[in-house]
Every structure is written in C-alpha cells, then in structure tokens.
Image (spheres, rainbow, N blue to C red):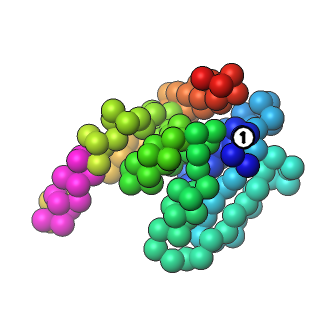
Amino acid sequence: MTGIVRILVDADACPVKDKIYKVAYRLNVPVVIVANSHFRVPVHPLIERVVVSDGFDAADDWIAEQTNAKSVVVTADILLADRCIKAGATVLSNTGKPFTGNSIGGAIATRAIMADLRAGGDIIGGPAPFSKTDRSRFLSALDAAIMRLQRGN
C-alpha cells in the first residue's frame, strides 16, 4: 500500500475520528484506526481497525512501520510524530497543527521540559480544552494534506 494516500490514526484519545471518517468518505481515502484495545469503527470498506498488543508503544510502533510519503498520520504523540516525519509522512495533531521537520525539534524539547517539571512536582496544566476552532482547523488541514498528496505534491 505504498502508492495510495491513506490516513493512519493513533486512536487513543483522538477527538476527531468522526471528522476523519467524513473526509475519508468524501475524498475516497482509506483510513486505518490503530489502538491497543477493541473499539467501534464504522462498517465501511474505507475504514480498517487494527488492534495491536497492549505492549508499551505497540500502536506507535505499528503506525511508524506502516507510514510512508503517502501517509497522513493523525496523532498527539510528539515522539510518534517525529518517527513518522522521518519516514516521510505528513503529520497532523488532533487540532490540525502540522508537525514538520522544522517544528518537531521544538515540540520534543517542550515535551521534555514539561516532563521534567511534572517529575519535579510542579503542578502544570494540561492542554487547552478541544474547541470548535480546533475541529475546524483540523478539517481544513486534513483536507489540504490529502489533496496535496493526491496531486503528488
């Protein structure tokens, strides 16, 4: 499946799966939803569910091994995003913000700083609540990424 555009989704805590399905149906793009537990997905020929073992990073490993330059990967996991970028994929966060070769280093550094603060006992807030603006930005970014890959750019 290296020649066709497809969407790979890190399904754990992904708030936009329903939007991904709608885009996939409209643009006729296969979607692979990956998680380490069973969950419901629409019964549709474009939608595939992959359940991996519950081993640490099993879903991430599966996605990273399957990704290529024709993949759009949807994840909030910065380290997975880095692996997929290195494999040539287009990577979007759940809010539609792209992870790129230019931005991933800063994201990894911020992640490390936040982990150190949490480990030191500092109380820090989590991500902002998911908003309508995030949903809209995600739809627009996913649409644009798929169209660009389908055109071969």
Residue 26 location in percent, x, y? 79, 30
Q: Which residues are magenta?
A: 109-120
**Camera-side residue: 91 or 20?**
91
- Indicate the quadrant containing the C terminus: top left, top right, bottom left or bottom right: top right
Residue 93 sits above or below residue 36 on the image = above
Residue 11 location in percent, x, y? 59, 56
**Residue 125 visible in the snapshot:** no
**Camera-side residue: 153 or 21?**
153
**Mark 1 residue type:** Gly
Report the predominant secondary structure element of the magenta stretch. helix
Question: Which residue lies at the image location 66% right of the left edge and 44% below the top edge?
Answer: 7
**Camera-side residue: 32 or 71?**
71
Q: Horizontally, is 126 left or right of 97 in the view?
A: left
Residue 59 location in percent, x, y? 55, 64
Question: Which residue lies at the image location 24% right of the left edge and 46% below the top edge?
Answer: 110
**Residue 153 visible in the snapshot:** yes
Q: Which residue is mark 1?
A: 3
Question: Which residue lies at the image location 76% right of the left edge and 56% below the top edge?
Answer: 48
Question: Which residue lies at the image location 65% right of the left edge and 25% below the top edge?
Answer: 152
